Image (cartoon, rainbow, N blue to C red):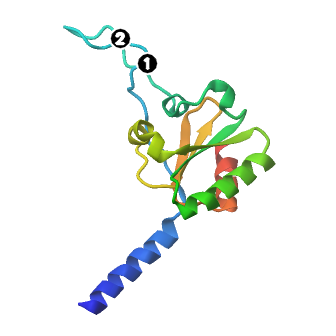
Amino acid sequence: MLLASLAAALAFGLYRAATDGRFRGTRAVAGRVASGASVSGPGPSSVEPVETTTAVVAGLEPDQLGERATLLQFSSAFCAPCRAARRVLSDVATTVPGVTHHELDAEHHLEVVRSLGILRTPTTLVLDAEGREITRAQGAPSKAQVLAELGRAL
């Protein structure tokens, strides 16, 4: 029993080490109702659902988006990998022209976390110039991973 537990823990640790910080596909945020629109009342709604960008869901203003891309990081107060991710993403944002970095505290933005499907911290979303999600990474990505993903996205 002890040997099986150790083997399972080792397998899980190896899996997490191999996948942590790796960028994957994106999660659609389509079908949200435009802010300020009301859909309550009798009968069918007169308001058509519209596609809302990730930046709008996260509360970013258009002037906060990068000219080429935005790195949106979700973190929490006592998360050690979040500090490492913050350093990497800030460094990339200062070295790559047209790229900005914004960090949101997941604990204080639970509605945003739920609507975007953020399951753990740190999670980094790469947004295009219009604020749409291109890709995401769970865990602390390396600088090389972020630069490679930005190269693919831009």
Q: Is residue 57 visible?
A: yes
Left or right of 10? Residue 5 is left
SS at mark 1 in the image? loop
Q: What amino acid type should be assigned to the residue bearing mark 1?
A: Ala
At x 44% / y 76%, what residue is drawn?
13
Decide if residue 32 is on the left or right side of residue 147: left
Q: Count of labels shown?
A: 2
Q: Earlier in the sequence, mark 2 or mark 1?
A: 1
The amino acid at mark 2 is Val
In percent of the image, x 55 and y 60: which residue is there? 22
> Between residues 147 and 141, which one lies in front from this camera angle?
141
The quarter of the rendered structure image containing the N terminus is bottom left
- Residue 85 position within the rendered picture, expressed as x and y whole percent measured from the top left: 62, 57
Residue pictured at 54% horizontal, 39% vertical: 133
| Residue at image mark 2 | 47
Q: Would you name the residue on which mark 1 appears?
A: 34
Q: Residues within 10 Å of mark 1 (few under 14, many from 20)?
A: some
